[in-house]
Amino acid sequence: MTTSYDPKPEHKFTFGLWTVGNKGSDPFGAEVRDPKSPVDLLYLLAEVGAYGVNFHDNDLIPIDSTPEEIGTIKENFKKALKDTGLVVPMATTNLFYDPIFRDGAFTSNDAYVRNYALQKTMKSMDLGVEMGAEVFVFWGGREGTETDASKDPVESIKRMRDAINFLCEYALDQQYALKFALEAKPNEPRGDLYNATTGHMLGFISTLDHPEMVGVNPEVAHEHMAGLNFSHGVAQAIDAGKLFHIDLNDQVFGRYDQDLRFGAANLKSAFFLVKLLEDHHYSGSRHFDAHAYRTEDQEGVKDFARGCMRTYLILKEKADRFNHDAEIQGLLGELNKMDNDLLQFKGPYSQTKAQALKAYPFDRKSRSMKGLRYELLDQLTNEVLLGVR
Ligand code: DIG
Ligand code: MN
Ligand code: MN
């Protein structure tokens, strides 16, 4: 029996190989799940109804693979993509796991490492395009410091800009129609990471040689780690035309990066996020950068993946109910109704308007007494979410 919460290709739900392939280790515990091959993970994602799969270069091709091994891996992966119908909307580079990146990649003090990172990323872009990727994510997992004695932060930003500028030129040179999506995180695994939030990234993008090629890939957990309202950061990216991708998961505030199942910790903020994405017709992947609890076996991994997608679809339906709830929409209409007398000030600036506005007799005291009924509005929102409206 299909329900309206069963994922379909048009929902564009994607998972990274590293998410459903997560083996459950953590800083204090060994792996609890057997490794799965990229091909096995494709069939798992097809079974749960995903639309697509994303990967870091080394999720698919181990870093020391021989040319023959690379050929075989790519051939098997392409066959499984064809067999399952899954697509690869996004690819990225692992610039954080190998020891060579212990002091970062693009911002390392060692030019040898910075140039190796460029080489690795160009090859990763080639691989991503070969598999059909149209978005290329950059998460600077080690681009930061434990001690600011080690680097001038302005120099580090310049190094990051030089790298992204160079790679934009490479994409243009190769005629790759790739859109770059920069992913922020405030800390972990480094003590502090540069370009710590989506807001920082939007500012950084404006300094690039080809800002039109570069957007952001905000992640719920990362902005929550910074104590921020995730929807507000996403709204800023939407407003700037820079929401090129999004990493959906969940996160308890004030914790390390938990990468929880979507909606597992903050259903209400997840609701406002889904409402924002759907109200603004976000057309990109709904990518779940998350993983199952360490307590789970492979069946639990499937429960995790299904839960991410079902929660999104249930909240999408709740957003639709909110948008069609007469009492809620009546309250919002009332709140946003403009006094007729103020219509004269709408639209672009003019000297006449400015003079009239300066002379306008505002009655500050009486307007300041007006109650806004947000208690009722928020309670009605809760009741939509609780399923009683
Ligand atoms: C972590 O949140 C990062 C890496 O998993 C990856 O580089 C990126 C892609 O979603 N997210
Ligand atoms: Mn994360
Ligand atoms: Mn992420």
Image (tube, helix red, strand yellow):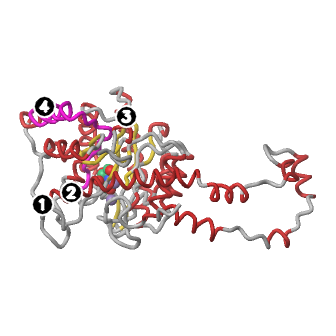
Q: What amino acid does circle 1 point to?
A: Arg
**Alpha carbons under labels 2 and 3: distance apart:** 31 Å
**C-alpha span from label 1 to label 3:** 34 Å
- In the rendered structure, find residue 75 and report the number of the disc placed on it: 4
Range of residues picked out in magenta: 72-97
Identify whether 129 is placed above or below 3: above
Disc 4 to disc 2, how far (Cα)?
Answer: 26 Å
Comparing marks 2 and 3, which lies closer to the viewer?
2
Give the left or right position of residue 122, taking residue 196 as reference. Answer: left
How far is the residue under mark 4 from the one under mark 3?
Answer: 22 Å
Q: Is 254 on the left-hand or right-hand side of 94?
A: right
- Please state the horizontal and vertical placement of residue 297, each as a whole percent of the image: 15, 61
Q: Which dot marks residue 178?
A: 3
Separation of residues labelled 1 and 4 (CA atoms): 26 Å
Asked which quadrant contains residue 214, the reply is: top left
Between circles 1 and 4, the one closer to the viewer is 1
| Residue that numbered label 1 is attached to | 33
Name the mark nearer the viewer: 4 or 2. 2
Where does label 2 land, which residue? 301
Image: 294 above or below 5: below
